[in-house]
């Protein structure tokens, strides 16, 4: 008798759990905190550094382990440039974007070699793969503007 009661209770609890799993929520789920919307605004390479301005919605973790990865146009090997400095921006545009949940971060790396056409920004959060860049030379010759496409 006790075994049959235990089996019936077990069956009922299993059916209740299955019913809860199949219920559709009646509310719209918010985007999970770990999913980032990342937009690269620009990449500028000077002789002494490379600056990347990113807009990020969600969490981010830029630190000494953050790096740019690219294929060397000379050797063909995959190479890395590690982050020198990151700075959160507080200018007028950054404050406007903050109202929509975006952080505006300026990242500084060592200079990219000439001829690089694609980079990956690797960090714990976020990771941005396949940033295609178009090189435009200025008359001064000391600055390359690499536009995000």
Image: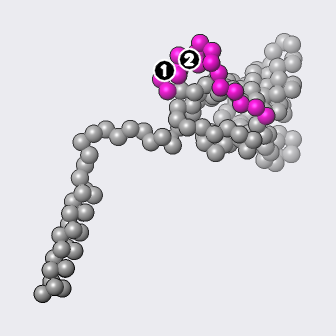
Residues under labels 2 and 1: Cα distance? Answer: 7 Å
- According to the picture, the residue beneath numbered tag 2 turns out to be 95
Q: Quadrant of residue 30?
A: top left
Residue 144 seen = yes
What's the residue at 60%, 42% (across, down)?
A: 125
Numbered disc 1: secondary structure? loop
Of the pair 131 and 61, the residue shown nearer to us = 61
Q: Quadrant of residue 85?
A: top right
What's the residue at 25%, 63% (across, down)?
A: 17
Tell me whether the residue at label 2 lies in contact with that at label 1, contact meaning CB atoms closer than 8 angstroms. Answer: yes
Residue 9 located left or right of residue 105: left
Numbered disc 2: secondary structure? helix
Of the pair 56 and 69, the residue shown nearer to us = 56
Of the pair 124 and 134, the residue shown nearer to us = 124
- According to the picture, the residue beneath numbered tag 1 turns out to be 99
Of the pair 12 and 23, the residue shown nearer to us = 12
Q: In this picture, which residue range is highlighted in magenta?
A: 84-101
Which quarter of the figure is the C terminus placed in? top right
Which percent across, then down, holds residue 39?
A: 58, 29
Which quarter of the figure is the N terminus placed in? bottom left
Binning the other alpha carbons within 10 Å of mark 1 as few (below 14), some (14 to 19) or many (20 upward) gives few
Residue 130 located left or right of residue 80: left
The residue positioned farthest toward the left in the image shown: 1
Residue 32 located left or right of residue 85: left
Q: Quadrant of residue 41?
A: top right
What's the residue at 62%, 18% (across, down)?
A: 90
């Amino acid at each position: 008798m006790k075994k049959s009661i235990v089996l019936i209770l077990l069956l009922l609890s299993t059916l209740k759990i299955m019913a809860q799993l199949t219920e559709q929520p009646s509310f719209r789920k918010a985007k999970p905190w770990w999913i980032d919307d990342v937009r690269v605004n620009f990449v500028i390479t000077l002789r002494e550094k490379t600056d990347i301005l990113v807009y990020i919605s969600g969490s981010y973790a830029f630190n000494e382990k953050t790096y740019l990865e690219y294929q060397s146009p000379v050797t063909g090997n995959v190479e890395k440039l590690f982050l020198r400095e990151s700075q959160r921006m507080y200018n007028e545009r950054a404050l406007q974007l903050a109202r929509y949940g975006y952080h505006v971060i300026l990242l500084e790396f060592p200079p990219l070699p000439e001829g690089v056409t694609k980079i990956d920004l690797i960090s714990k959060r976020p990771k941005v793969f396949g940033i295609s860049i178009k090189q435009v030379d200025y008359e001064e010759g000391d600055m390359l503007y690499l536009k995000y496409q």
